[in-house]
Every structure is written in C-alpha cells, then in structure tokens.
Image (cartoon, coloured by chain):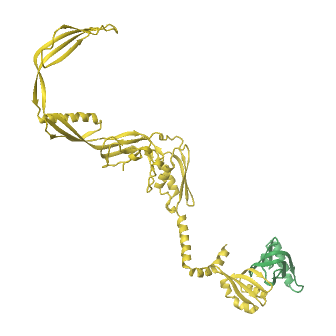
Amino acid sequence: MQQRRTGLRERLVSLLELPGDVVLDVPRATLIGNAELVLENHRGLLEYRPERVVLRLPEGRMAIDGEELRIGYLSPDQLVLHGRITGLRYAPPEGGGA
Amino acid sequence: MLRRLIRHLLGTLRIEVTGGAIERFLNLCLEADIQLWDVRRWPERLQATLLVPHFFRLRPIARASRCRVRIRERRGLPFLSRRLRRRPFLLAGAAGALATLIWAGSHFWVVDVRIKGPGHLDPRAILAVAAEAGLRRGAWKTQVDPDEVARHLRQKIDELSWAVVRVRGTRAVIEVVEKGAVNPPDQAVCVHLVARKAGVVEHVIPFQGEPLVKKGDVVQAGDMLVECALRYWAGGRPAVIPGMPLPPREEVARTLIAQATVRARVAYRQYYEFPVTETVKEPTGRRYTQWVLNWNGRSILLTGRGPVPYTDYEVSTRTFPPGGWRNWNPPVELVIREVAEVSTRTVTVPVEELTERARTAMERRLAWLLGPGDRIVTPLRAEVVQQEGGYVGILVTVETLEEVSAPLEGPMEQQAGDRVG
C-alpha cells in the first residue's frame, strides 16, 4: 500500500513537473567539491566520528566517509558538513548497515 | 550576516560534551529544536557552539543521554556588556571615540577647488564665495546644500560658465569652468595711494584696492591710504572669506592700480612778517634824458653828457632797434635812458593793512595748493602774534577739505612698513 502511494506520487510529480524534494519526502544533498556537504531533510545522526558520519533519512540512511569531518551547522532540517569527503553512500532503512 | 548578528546579540556558548551517548545527545538536541554549529568530535568528547537561551534546555537532554556538559567559552554581547560594566572608563572611551568619529565625519574638513579654463580666476576667490553660501572648512555637512552653493557661485562670479560641488566623505570638491574670454587684471603693476599731506580723513570712497584708513583716522604725509593688493579676486571685486583672518601680505594674489577718493581735513598755519614802516619814493618831476647809440659792441653817447645830477633817482630805459632784413639784424641800436629824480619818505603801515596783506598772501598760496574739487571749510583767520622790533608777525590759519591721496608705484613688500592701522 505504501509503495503504491509512493509510486503514484512520483508519477504525479513527473507529470506536473514539480520539484521532487518539495513534494516527495526525500533528502536533498548538495556537495561542493569534496570539502562541504549540505544535506536538507534529514532525520538525525546515527553515528558521528571524525572519519565517518551516518545520517538517518526519511527512507534509509546515508553514510559519508572522509577525514577530519566536522559539523558546521546542525539544525532539525539542515546539516552542513565540512572536511575532506571521500565517499557518500545510501543504504536501505533496515539491516545491512552503512 | 544577520545570523551572525543575532548570535552576537544573544550570546553564544562553546560547550564540551563528554561521556554517555553523544549521538543520542545530538539527536535529542535536534528534537528540541536546538541549533548547533561548529560541531567537532574527538573519540571521547565533542565540542559544539549554541545560543545562550538554548543552553538552559540542555539539562534534560544531557540527563537522558547520560552526557556531561561543560562550558568552555562565552562569547557575544551579554558577556561583553558584563565585562564592560566592570570597566566603565573603557566603555566611556569607546563611546567617546564613537562620538568623535561621528562628529568628525559630519563636517567638511577639506574644500578643494578645481578650475578649468584660462586660469585667471583665483581659487581663493571661489572659496570665499563658497564660504558665503556656507561651504567652508569645518562646516556641518547637514547645513551645506551643494546645489545651493553651486548656484551661489554661478550668481556671484560672472567669470564662471559652470560650477558644481561634489561631496566625497568629509571632502568637498568645487569644480568650476571659467569662461573663455576673461580680462584679467594687470598683475605686474602695483600702485598704492599714499597721503601727500597730513590730515583727518573725512571720507574714503575706494574704487580699486583695499582701503586701510576710515573716517576719523589721522594720517601723516606718506602714510598708506589704499593698498594696491586685491586679496581675493572675483568678478573684479574683492571677496573675503567671512570669519577668516586675512592672509599675510606676501600671499596676495593680485595687484592693481589703487583708485579711490580720500578726502581729509587739512589744517594750514602760515606765519607772515612785515616791517611796520615802509619807504615810499615819489617823483619830484625833474627829468634828465640820455641818448646812447650802441654800434658793433661800442656805446656812443649822443646827448646828455656828464654824470646824473640827482641824488635819488629812478632810471627807465627804452631800446629802439633799427629793424632787420630777413634773418639779418644790423649791429646797431638806439637806447634812450630817462632819469627821474625821486624823493624818499618813510610811512607807517597800519596793522589792519598788514593783516590784509597776510590774508591775501595766504589766499594766493592756497590757490596754488588746492585742486579743483578742494574747498576751504573754515574762513581764514589772521592773528597778530607779535609787534616788536619794528616788525609785525601775523599767523594765518585755515582748514581745507581736500583730496590727499597720491599714487605711489612700487612692490608691496618694500612698503610694508608704510601701512596705517
């Protein structure tokens, strides 16, 4: 049922040419070089270490690997990450791990 | 920028979180809508910055996540004001510096003039006229209307074809364009007007130059009356910056031929002396005539031989040349000498007549001394001052109103000492 509703919403967005990050409950990540990552619409932190940050997303998780990672700004709807970013991965919501 | 300002106004705290579940601490902060920035993680601790009002909401979060929170640094206005309250003089100094800065920035400190054109206009004349409209060094910026100053300049100075005032901070730049055909004053000639007589100045009407005397001043002969300097020159007129002292004479920009009417009351005192008695000669009627022929440098007595038979006599001579032909005159002439016998007697002249003679002599002298516009303001007074030794001394006094200025050419520097007042 949930998958069906999501599929309908995606088709509506495609049909009306609406911005997906506004209508769909998905994160928006902006990567500036490998020095800064701006992530909007996250759901909190699962792990924070200088070489790895794992974020909870509305659907799944995002793992960011790098060196000397630090959070420049952290608010309920936005996270700005600084440092030397080497990798970025999406992971399913449950199991598997990042 | 705005976010930084809000942070500064509210104050920020740098906290250190140790122990417990740090990720849980962060997530609970997010749930409580607490914003964090500059979050740094070490294996055993975490540092972050947050607003002061948010700090007081951390206690339940720290308890729930079993973390310990310590304040490492305080920043922002609340902490700054607390520190400043303990140092009132520092605060006063800062306030004073700020006030001084605002005050200094509210004035014109430099007024520049840029002239385009033949270059006959004196920049100081522009400054002087601008000062009339309020634009001068030290003037409040709010009290000066640049458009009004430019309009005033165009009205007052005929030689300008365009003027504008530009304001750059505390600097005002007056840009003017001079008309092409401007007759500059002759700068090479410098002619002063000096007093040629001593007197009391009655009135001064300057046409060109700077008058140095006024009504009531006592001047001596040689004193400077009108200086050839025109310190500020605009439209053929001097313009002086109001409220500013005149610059030194050495900086006078323009020179000219001073022209003015300076009339002064001049007093004359003349002493005349006459003998009380006079010798009068009267003819007796007896005459004796000699005819002499002068020929080629020699005198030939024709009639009246022998010496003159009278003791006192007067001789009158008449010469008759024979006339010439073209440019040739014959070397001969006839001379008739008439000798008339006279008798001499001594008469006493009354004092009244002598006084009248002195008065007449003074009038004759004044006729030479006074010019066409001059006049006698008090009647001649003749006073007998002594009558001893066979002589009568008479003092004649008179006062006139006359033009006393006379031109004196030369550089100003050499005549600096002649200045009056």
- Considering only vertical position in the picture, is B174 above or below B375? below
Whole-percent x, y for residue A45 in the image: 79, 84
Whole-percent x, y for residue B41 in the image: 78, 82
The reply, left or right, for residue A79 in relation to residue B148 is right
The reply, left or right, for residue A69 in relation to residue B353 is right
- Considering only vertical position in the picture, is B291 above or below B213? above
Image colour for chain B is yellow
Q: Quadrant of residue B384?
A: top left
Of residues B287 and B176, the one nearer the viewer is B287
The reply, left or right, for residue B242 in relation to residue B117 is left
- Considering only vertical position in the picture, is B311 above or below B362? above
Image colour for chain A is green
Of residues B358 and B98, the one nearer the viewer is B358
Whole-percent x, y for residue B292 in the image: 21, 9
Whole-percent x, y for residue B190 in the image: 44, 41
The residue positioned 47% from the left and 47% from the top of the image is: B233
* Residue found farthest to the front: B307
For residue A20, say whether it is visible.
no
